[in-house]
Amino acid sequence: MKTIIVSGFRRFGTYRSNPTETLAGRLHETSLSGYRVIPVVYDANIPKDDRGEKLLALAHQLDASGIISLGVDSQKRGLCVERIARNIILNAKYCPPELQNTRVDATRSLGEELNLHRGPWALYNFQRLCAERHIPTEISHDAGGFCCNHLAYQVLAAQKRGIVPAMPFIFIHVPCSPESIADTSTFQKEDKVALDIRVMAAGIENLATVADLD
């Protein structure tokens, strides 16, 4: 059976849990549209090592067909595919002050934008299939300035360096799940949307279904 790596992050801030960790665990060793899922879960911080290069190396070691990386953003209202990662660390809420406005990759230009390669993921078909099944989706050009953007940029930069061979990679932000919300009243007042883990899993299943990873 072919393999897909699904990465997520652990709990941070005031969240009771991180839906991406829950989702990665739920998909572990399942047959995701014919693919075996191997989860990788990171601490929600800015690491000193190169997670991107290591993630790619692991994917090649496992002979994976692709990598689906997930992050949580309470502002999202559906499965949100990121199109761009930037060479900057900038998040007033979660980043330490000494890291604000610094580069993810010190060897590349501050603020450089790298486009996520989307060809094999068939995004039009993914969104169409999700719409048919009433699963909300979005497209974003801003992956944020915290650990999600950091990982996405490191993966793209590592592939550009050519140290690790290219690998189909996609980054998707998901909303909160009901069990991850600490303060439901405030969450609702801010007009935020929670999405059931089962709906998220069905959306990821749709992505694997339409992707051309062979």
Image (cartoon, rainbow, N blue to C red):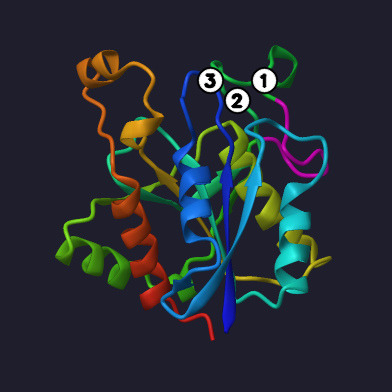
Which residue lies at the image location 83% right of the left edge and 43% below the top edge?
107
Specify whether 149 is left or right of 14: right
**Residue for point 46% across, 24% down:** 15
The stretch drawn in magenta includes residue 170: no
Residue 3 located left or right of residue 18? right
**Image position, residue 41 (x, y; %):** 63, 47
Residue 75 to residue 62: above or below: above
- Tag 3, which secondary structure? loop
Q: For the C terminus, give its image quadrant.
A: bottom right
Q: Residue at horizontal 75%, vertical 15%?
A: 98
Q: Which residue is mark 3?
A: 13
Earlier sequence position, callout 2 versus callout 3: 3
Q: From the image, state whether disc 3 or disc 1 is nearer to you.
A: 3
Look at the image and tell me whether residue 91 can be seen. Answer: yes
Pinpoint residue 196: horizontal percent, then vertical percent: 29, 44
Decide if residue 214 is on the left or right side of residue 193.
right
**Mark found first going from the N terminus, 1 or 2:** 2
Residue linked to disc 1: 100
Q: Report the span colored magenta.
A: 102-110
Q: In the depicted view, which residue is nearer to us: 194 or 47?
A: 194
Indicate which label's residue lies in the foreground, 2 or 3.
3
**Residue carrying label 2:** 90
Contact, mark 1 vs mark 2 (Cβ under 8 Å): yes
- Tell me the kind of residue under disc 1: Gln
In the image, what residue type sits under mark 2?
Answer: Leu
Three-letter amino acid code of the residue under disc 3? Gly
Q: Main secondary structure of the magenta part?
A: loop
Residue closer to the observer: 26 or 56: 26
